[in-house]
Image (cartoon, rainbow, N blue to C red):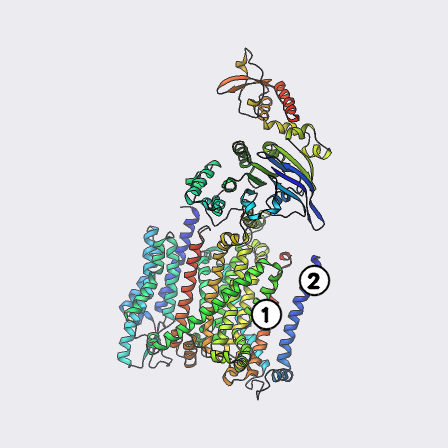
Amino acid sequence: MIEIVGLTKTYGDRRAVDGLDLTIPTGELTVLLGPSGAGKTTVLRCINRLVEPTSGSILVDGVDIATLDPVALRRSMGYVIQNVGLFPDMTVRENVAAVPRMLGWDRRRIAARVDEMLEMVGLDPERYGDAYPRQLSGGEAQRVGVARALAADPPILLMDEPFGAVDPLTRERLQREMRHLQAKLRKTVVFVTHDIDEAVLLADRIALMRDGRLEQHDTPEALWRRPANDFVSRFFGENLGLRVIIRHCLADVTLKPLPHDAGGLPRVDAGVSLKEALAELVGRRARALLVMRDGRPAGVFDFDVLVESLSREDGRARA
Amino acid sequence: MRGREDTRRVVARWTGIAALAGATVWMTLDARGFERVLRALAPNESAWLYPTKPLSALVLEQVWLATAASVLALALGSALGTLALTGFGVAFRDLVLSVGSLAQTVPTVALMALLVPLTGYGPEPVVIALTLYGVLPIALNVIAGIEGVPPEVRDAAAGIGMGRAQRLLRVEIPLAMPVILGGVKNVVVVNVSAATLGAVVAAGGLGMPILAGFHDYNDAFILEGALPAIALALLADRLLTVRPRWDRG
Amino acid sequence: MDGADVQLHQRARAVAVAASVLGAAAALVPFGLVLRTTRIDRGVSVSLASALGVWGAALVACWLAVAAMALSRMPLRTRGVAASLIAGAAPVLALWRAGAFAEAYAKQAGELSRVSLGPGFWLTAAAAYVAVFAATAWLEAGPLRATVSYAPFAGIAAVLASGAVSGIGIAREYANNADAFVRQLAVHLGYVGASVAVGLVFGIALGLTAARRPSAEPLVFGVLNVLQVVPTLAFIGLLYPVLTGLSRSVELFAALGVRGVGWAPVVVVLSAYAVYPIARNTHAALASIDPATVDAATGIGMGALRRFAMVEAPLATPVVLAGLRVALVQSTAGAIIAGLVGGGGLGTFVFLGASETASDLMLLGVVPIVGLALLFDRGLSAIEGALSPWKEPA
């Protein structure tokens, strides 16, 4: 758990962060969201002490990080940034091995770990291991950046607009993979972005910031249903609901039972998100979809199901 | 803020130039006054001014040698650089680049000395050597400057309907100017400096009193040549350190 | 093979043909060799082609062959190897036969007579450089290309070692001055080594300072730039009274042989010149490192020292080496000035030769200077390349 207490950082007259209190639960992905200049990156860089706060403190698992050696602290946290920052003179393998090497792992353990990491982020170690960063595409470089950050298996992962510099298609793939990765690894992730869709897709909780202050800290569903103030609702706009439904897939919701004449309905796989299912309804001008699970019909999805699932989700968030 | 900083830089630059130019002119023209300074710096000598030639003549020789070589090098070098970028000459671009770095390995004064059997003693070997020495750096900078023009600017120029020659004259050369001027500056400064060595092949210039001073163990002769030579070289350097307005900031 | 390659090969063709024309002209111009009755006689010039008889014809034939190959449709690899070897053979052939010619001439014109290599020979060497440069563009980078590129140098070395050219003027000067040559070569290398060592220490220190504190940058480079601009001879002249005074007032300096002329001012001046390229490259290298790389290094837990050792230093080293290369070439050429101010070195031969108008003696000084400078240039370029495998190959 990361507890941020009364964090303030001023640059000259400007308050980049202004008395921020925020608790980031273990094993969750928390997105710091807000317009540019809101202080998101400063908060992130305070967590690994690349920036020293003017006042306030940050506690990791109850320990004030100001009392820790910053270098040792940073080695216990993965760090991924928008410009990747791969070491241009090291191969992909050497880049990923950087932190384990500093931690003094033995050679064989490093080699095995590096290959494991590369495979985890979807890069073939045979093909990419000995390449230099200049030979990688933006998306590949960012995968290597994630692999490097995770190599030493740090419990905390800090990510600063990690997918901001890649093209939209690659970004979407990386986001989806990030989601699967996090579902598997359950790290405590602090993720900075200004992209609402990215935040809604990835976040367990969103901390919405403005001018160095926290406006609201809650699940995306709660932000949609119960915005704390005008700024929050204006920031997310009218269609946050439409965005939120990307977080849930058909397998999560209670479908209507199969009718007798289901054969004529368009079919859709249970793995797709509610947003995609809704798009399918609209696109096919259908009233209902036949949801297939493992190749067998599992139920029927229609607009009622969607509405029902959303109110249920709301209830869960409230509890 | 920016404006005041700018003004300060401009004032500093022109103060420096004025001081250097003033010093050079004063040393050259006020022989009596300069002699008094030399007398103060080297009180133990019996003579303070190089007897063979007045300083004004030596300065003129130095400037003449450097100017002749620089003008020739500029003309030949920009022709060579432009040729290496256009039409048939493109084949020789890489060669010019390769030889350009190679030529720096030959000491200027050696080139002057080696030319003596062909040209005889006098200013000829100096002018020829310095010209040969300056051609390639100028050509290299012309090539680097024009090739450094961003392709999107080139595209835009073509896109608004400029022809090849128009593009070169109105867009590429002006944008390449800082780099070309950088090369010109280096060549001129090297020439003003190296003209001092012309004394070795009897071409005159400010090296004469310096060599005479080494020969006679006369500090004053050495300083009489060295001080104006340094002032001239610094003056050339300061004068040619320019950046176009669009490149500042 | 893509279009850019084809275009490159076409262009090499034009360059190779031009080099052949230059080479043939060099063989035919009437100042290939200079025949003198004494070593400082002005002498008469003859063309290489006429002096070397049948071998002269062979020399011209070499160039015709290179031109013909350049224009032929031979496979690239064969064409590249054959044309560069033949072009490289031309100056070797000319040198070897000029040696034989010199011996014959000495028998006829007496022991005092000299045969010197004239502009025709040096043009032949230049043409060979250009032709090999062009022909190797037909070859892929690799050991084969390196071998054929450096084969001519091996050929020249073999001819020199065989003693076949001992009758040529520059070799005769060497024979007369062999002891002095070795001594002055050592002195010259001493100047280069000392000045570059000082340049490295100060250059790296000042470059680092300028990179770490931007406020110091204008001062550091302002001063270094002024030093760079001061003419060599005037610089030594300014030091003359200072060093004379030092040696008179401080016994240690006097004991070390510090005087207003001699080795001391040469080392000071060459060192001052050597600082600038190294400082500039050190600064540029550190300034050009992507801030994201440094941020990432810090962010994954590298301390300042480790970051410097693992990230910044390896990235900067090739660029610093490039500065070292410039300094080395500059010092090697610049140390010639020592010969003018009583400091010895290879310049001794150049200035002695200049005062006697003895070209061969001047060449005895100049040729090794140029050779050394080229050696340093190529050697360090190779090291730079080997140290930066992550960069786009040039």
Identify the residue position indicated by label 2 in the image: B7
Nearer to the camera, A196 or B51: A196
According to the picture, the residue beneath numbered tag 1 turns out to be B236
In this view of the protein, which residue sits in the foreground, C295 or B207? C295
Seen in the picture, residue C193 relative to C137 is either above or below; the reply is below
Instruction: Indicate the position of residue C138 as horizontal and vertical percent values.
Output: 37, 53
**Where residue A235 sits: x, y (%)?**
69, 35
Q: In which quarter of the image is residue A20?
A: top right
Q: In this view, does A54 lie above or below B237?
A: above
Amino acid type at image mark 1:
Ala
Residue B128, x across and y down, in percent: 48, 72
Quarter of the image where one finds residue B22: bottom right
Q: Which mark is residue B27?
A: none
Secondary structure found at label 1: helix
* Chain assignment, label 1: B
Residue A239 visible in the picture: no
Is C184 above or below relative to A290?
Answer: below
Marks 2/1: CA distance? 22 Å
SS state under label 2: helix
Q: Can residue A82 be seen in this view?
A: yes
Say if C32 sits above or below C302 in the image.
Answer: below
Number of marks: 2
